[in-house]
Amino acid sequence: MPSFSTTLEQAIHAALGLANKRSHEFATLEHLLLALMDEQDAARV
């Protein structure tokens, strides 16, 4: 299994939470992008 940075793991976890909150069956790239917008370092990009 690949090793991810703590920041990326938190973003993936947040993306899963966003999908779950919206009763979506899958977490998609859009969920990950939304989660990354809340991450200060990624939001600058």
Image (cartoon, rainbow, N blue to C red):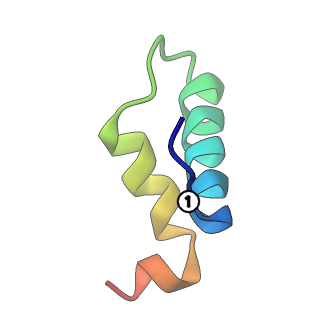
Per the image, label 1 sits on a secondary structure element best described as helix
Task: Quickly name the residue at label 1.
Answer: 8
* Residue that sits furthest to the top in the current view: 25
- Asked whether, in this view, residue 30 is left or right of residue 25, the answer is left
* Residue that sits furthest to the front in the current view: 1
Within-10-Å neighbours for mark 1: few <14, some 14–19, many 20+ = some
Q: Is residue 34 above or below residue 42?
A: above
Number of numbered labels in the structure image = 1
Tell me the quarter of the picture where residue 34 sits: bottom left
Q: Is residue 17 above or below residue 7?
A: above
Question: Residue 4 versus residue 31: which sits nearer the camera?
Answer: 4
Amino acid type, callout 1: Leu
Q: Is residue 22 above or below residue 34?
A: above
Residue 13 rendering spot, x and y as whole percentages: 65, 43
Question: Residue 36 versus residue 6: which sits nearer the camera?
Answer: 6
Name which residue lies at 68% across and 64% down. 6
Residue 11 rendering spot, x and y as whole percentages: 58, 55
Quadrant position of the C terminus in the picture: bottom left
Name which residue lies at 45% across and 28% down. 27
Question: Residue 21 versus residue 3: which sits nearer the camera?
Answer: 3
Quadrant position of the N terminus in the picture: top right
Tell me the quarter of the picture where residue 39 sits: bottom right
Tell me the quarter of the picture where residue 33 sits: bottom left
- Asked whether, in this view, residue 31 is left or right of residue 18, the answer is left
Name which residue lies at 56% across and 46% down. 12
Name which residue lies at 54% across and 29% down. 19
Residue 16 rendering spot, x and y as whole percentages: 59, 33
